[in-house]
């Protein structure tokens, strides 16, 4: 079966390959942005992408496949482009992609940055807060779909105001332009078709945040109901965050576990379930400030709040372990090979974990942490409440 859909990347100069021109010559329908459609010559029917564009994508996917369809996109359609959107909905036999050099490649070429050492962040139709986990000392970023002044403001608020910024507009075309500056002093306006490149430089006194588990407790706004740093690191090690997998953070409190799971990889997904409205709001704010605004937060009582949720690859139970049928429902919902971890600090909670450990197996661990604190003019150890942890993998 020959592909019925061709996705063509177009550069700023509008130049097309022989293959792309042949596809346009035989097309029955061409879909693209107004600028893209203005760059091509075709006798086919034309349609401009609506906003939002997903309804038309779904219409194309569900529509007839007895005619030749061409979709136009900027640069490389498979790099945070419409090609990736179609790829998630179609079989590879249904379409072919004719890419152009991406804005990412051109930006790296202009700056002399090896692509493998640069992090690409797409803020196209997405919150700019997504760049937060990538902001680390010495890291180079290329950001799609962002206003340079907003990037500069966010960097400055994070303690990276000394970072270098480069605004690259109309890459690869006759109107290509470049502006350089420092985040805290940025004054250049952002025009059309621009990418922002950043060389991250931490201000003196800024405390960098890693994407590894164990953020400082102070990184979270909390009412005290949170999994502490040392226990959190041990818990995430047992949950094993993996790309593309989903976590349920049950009884989320401050949201620390779900947030750190999500920061492990941009494709990690998490749902936080919390019964208190004030904590739900706090979780959402913490998620935004720590660069994972897509964290889903559900307000509701357990176990009813779990009804209808997608099957998870891992579950953390940080509260409500004694709730009737909670563990049973979580175990049933968990995918084969999934990890379930529960932490408790009460004797009643330990009794529940002992029961489930006997029934389902796994490991029981007692985690004791003591921190040095001032005692008079000297230091002494102040112990945190011991945590009993049950970790089990579903066959």
Image: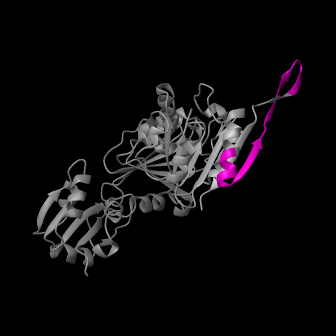
Q: Where is residue 99 in the image (x, y as percent from the top left)?
A: 34, 69
Q: Which residue lies furthest to the top in this view?
A: 376
Q: Which residue lies furthest to the bottom in this view?
A: 1
Q: What residue appears at the point 62 percent right and 41 percent down from the top-left corner?
A: 209
Q: Position of residue 183 (x, y in %)?
A: 50, 38
Q: Position of residue 194 (x, y in %)?
A: 36, 50
Left or right: residue 28 versus residue 218 is left
Residue 106, placed above or below residue 381: below
Q: Quadrant of residue 62?
A: bottom left
Residue 200 visible in the picture = no
Left or right: residue 280 versus residue 20 is right
Nearest the camera: 238 or 68? 238
Q: What residue appears at the point 51 percent right and 53 percent down from the top-left corner?
A: 332
Q: Residue furthest right?
A: 378
Quadrant where the N terminus lies? bottom left
Residue 366 visible in the picture = yes
Left or right: residue 9 versus residue 282 is left
Q: Assess whether residue 328 is covered by the magenta stretch.
A: no
Nearest the camera: 58 or 306? 306
Q: Quadrant of residue 29?
A: bottom left
Counting the numbered discs, the total is 0
Q: Quadrant of residue 26?
A: bottom left
Color theme of the render: one colour
Left or right: residue 103 versus residue 345 is left
For the record, the magenta segment spans: 355-380
């Amino acid at each position: 079966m020959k592909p019925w859909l061709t996705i063509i990347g177009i550069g700023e100069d509008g130049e097309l390959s022989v293959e792309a021109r042949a596809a346009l010559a035989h097309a029955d329908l061409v879909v693209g942005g107004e600028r893209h459609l203005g760059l091509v010559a075709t006798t086919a029917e034309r349609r401009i992408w609506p906003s939002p564009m997903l309804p038309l994508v779904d219409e194309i996917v569900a529509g007839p496949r007895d005619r030749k369809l061409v979709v136009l996109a900027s640069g490389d359609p498979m790099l945070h482009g419409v090609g990736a959107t179609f790829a998630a909905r179609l079989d590879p036999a249904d379409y072919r992609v004719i890419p152009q050099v991406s804005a990412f490649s051109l930006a790296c070429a202009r700056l002399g940055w090896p692509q493998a050492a640069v992090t690409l962040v797409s803020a196209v139709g997405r919150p700019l807060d997504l760049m937060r986990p990538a902001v680390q000392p010495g890291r180079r970023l290329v950001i799609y779909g962002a206003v340079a002044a907003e990037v500069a403001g966010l960097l400055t608020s994070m303690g990276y105001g000394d970072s270098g910024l480069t605004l690259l507009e109309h890459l690869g075309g006759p109107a290509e332009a470049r502006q350089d500056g420092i985040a805290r002093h940025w004054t250049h306006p952002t025009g059309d078709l621009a990418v922002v490149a950043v060389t991250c430089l931490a201000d003196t006194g800024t405390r960098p945040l890693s994407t590894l588990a164990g953020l400082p407790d102070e990184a979270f706004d909390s009412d005290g109901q949170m999994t502490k740093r040392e226990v959190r690191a041990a818990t995430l090690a047992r949950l094993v965050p993996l790309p593309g997998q989903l976590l349920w953070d049950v009884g989320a409190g401050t949201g620390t576990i779900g947030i750190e799971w999500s920061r492990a990889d941009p494709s990690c997904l998490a749902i936080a379930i919390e019964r208190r409205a004030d904590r739900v709001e706090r979780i959402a704010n913490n998620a935004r400030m720590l660069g994972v605004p897509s964290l889903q937060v559900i307000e509701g009582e357990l176990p009813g709040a779990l009804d209808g949720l997608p099957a998870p690859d891992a579950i953390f139970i940080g509260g409500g372990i004694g709730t009737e049928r909670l563990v049973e429902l979580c175990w049933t919902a968990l995918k084969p090979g999934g990890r379930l971890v529960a932490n408790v600090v009460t004797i009643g909670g330990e009794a529940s974990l002992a029961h489930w450990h006997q029934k389902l197996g796994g490991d029981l661990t007692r985690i004791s942490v003591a921190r040095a604190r001032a005692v008079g003019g000297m230091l002494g150890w102040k112990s945190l409440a011991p945590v009993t942890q049950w970790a089990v993998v579903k066959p």
